[in-house]
Image: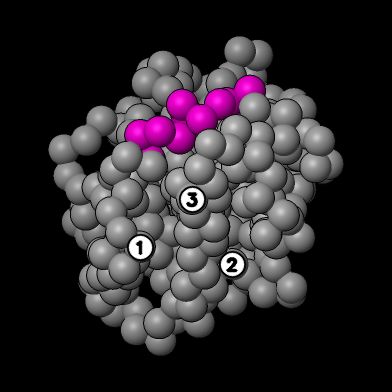
Amino acid sequence: MPRWHWIYRDFVESVDNLSGASWPQSVTRYLEQNWALLKSIHFGPRGFESYREVMTHFQILTRERYSSLLDKLPDPPTFELTVTSIVERLLRHLNLQEQDQDVYVIVGLDCTNIYSTEYEGRPVTVLCLEATNGDFREIELLFAHEVHHWKRQSLIPHNIFEFSVYERCATEGLAICFSEEIQPGRAVHEYCFVPPESVVWVQSHIHELTEAIRELRPFETQATSALFSRRPEWVPIPGMPPRTGYVYGYLRTRAFLSRTRTNATEMAHVDCDAIFGGAMIDG
């Protein structure tokens, strides 16, 4: 089972237990307790290199940004039992019982939701609670996506995030389709974690985007960054919104699953070539 690291507790305690403390004082206490860890797994990977940058960003956000989270969170034992139960159910759904994974539950800078990174030479998962505002349904949606990544990586010999742009599209598309299986009936943009207009853009440019991806060098990081980064340095189509790869991967994967009458649970192992090697596009 995953190894849980409940770093968010320090944030809650810093804000709630410092009677009369200002917002900067509360944040300072939280950072002093966890600076090296948070810089390695969150601030640095998200582009915040210095303590001053981090403090400035927290002050810009203000305590109000975190009020909903703080108001909704139950006591730590209840909250943590509920979260671990959600993840254990997802693991059973995917028949993934022996999972050697560290999960850090933090309060971050409101710049992402859940992601994989490396810490001390090991792959880890980071959940930023502020992205969920303490809503267990949102936490389940995020973990459904991430747990499917764990399953796929256990079946694929190469790095599912870095091998090629097609592998990344397949990996994200399958995870999004699995999230849809777990929580059916939501809008596509909610599964893909993008604005609604990004979905519309991809749907209306999907053939153009397919051709543009074919012209990319699929094993270079620039190709993956162009489709999945929040702030890409370059995009293959003028006006292309950030993170279109999530929507594109979802649409192509959904078409593949529909055509083969399968689902993301069954097809966690599928080779990306099966999805992108001439698959029909259901825009």
Q: Residue at x 22, y 35 (%)?
A: 186
Residue type at tag 1 = Pro
Evaluate if marks 3 and 1 touch, with contact meaning CB atoms under 8 Å apart.
Answer: no
**Relative image position of residue 61 (x, y in whole percent):** 57, 26
Q: Residue at x 20, y 48 (%)?
A: 183
* Looking at the image, residue 210 lies above or below residue 166: above
* Looking at the image, residue 232 lies above or below residue 270: above
* Location of mark 3 (residue): 17
Quick one: 22 or 259, which is closer to the camera? 22
Label 3 crowding class (10 Å Cα cut-off): few <14, some 14-19, many 20+?
few
Magenta region, residue range:
60-69
Q: Residue at x 59, y 67 (%)?
A: 124
Q: Mark 2 or mark 3, which is nearer the start of the sequence?
A: 3
Badge number at residue 124: 2
Q: Residue at x 16, y 38 (%)?
A: 185
Quick one: 5 or 17, which is closer to the camera? 17
- Mark 3 to mark 1: distance in Å? 14 Å
